[in-house]
Amino acid sequence: MSELSSYPTGISLSDDNRLVIDWSDNVSSRIPFRILRDNCPCAHCREAERHPQPVELLPVISAAEAQPLLVQGVKPLGNYAYTIAFSDGHDTGIYKLELLRQLGDAIADAES
């Protein structure tokens, strides 16, 4: 992945369940919470992606998983990433700025 030339100038949560990042090059990324969660870069999520569990006929889900997915917190991690806490209890992913920009650009391309 190449060096990112822009940086976040603002970050917020929208009413339509998106993480909004304003970048220094005047681009605004609007990333749905589900896209963020599905692209979590933590080791546990990446391992689960590589080795999916057999499908259960009647899966059991927790009360948190039955609720709409929300972002409960976003914290900067140095100058290069953010940690994101989700309503399903997951909060271990470190979202590098490059990944956030990549996700935002992919959403913008898909919506245009």
Image (spheres, rainbow, N blue to C red):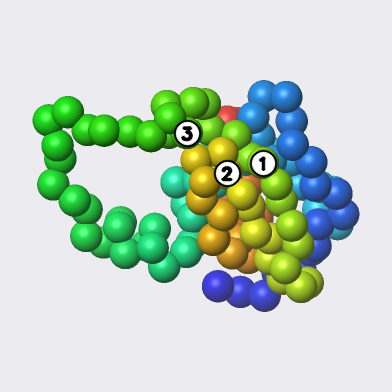
Does 10 sit above or below residue 68?
below
> Which residue position is annotated with label 1?
72
- Residue 64 — which label? 3
The amino acid pointed to by label 2 is Phe
Q: From the viewer's perspective, is 55 left or right of 18?
A: left
Disc on the earlier residue, 2 or 1: 1
* Residue 4 in sight here: yes
Give the spatial CA distance, label 2 vs label 1: 5 Å
Front residue of 91/112: it is 91
Q: Residue at x 22, y 53 (%)?
A: 52
Please, what is the three-letter code of the amino acid marked with disc 3?
Ala
The amino acid type found where label 1 is placed reads Gln
Labels 2 and 3 touching (C-beta < 8 A) = no
- Say what secondary structure mark 3 lies in: helix
Residue at image point 67% right, 41% down? 72
Name the residue furthest front. 63
Q: Residue at x 67, y 24 (%)?
A: 16
Camera-nearest residue between 96 and 45: 45
Percent coordinates x, y for residue 85 in the rendering: 61, 49
| Image coordinates for residue 109, horizontal then vertical, percent | 57, 40
Q: Which residue is mark 2?
A: 86
Give neighbour class at mark 2: few <14, some 14-19, many 20+ (Cα, 10 Å).
many
- Bin the neighbour count of mark 1 within 10 Å (Cα to Cα): few under 14, some 14-19, many 20 and up: few
The crowding category of the residue bearing disc 3, from other C-alpha atoms within 10 Å (few below 14, some 14 to 19, many at least 20), is: few
Left or right: where 2 falls relative to 45: right
Badge 2 vs badge 1, beta-carbon distance below 8 Å: yes
Of residue 109 and residue 101, the one placed in the foreground of this image is: 101
Real-space Cα distance between discs 3 and 1?
12 Å
Quarter of the image that includes the C terminus: top right
Structural distance between the alpha carbons of marks 2 and 3: 10 Å
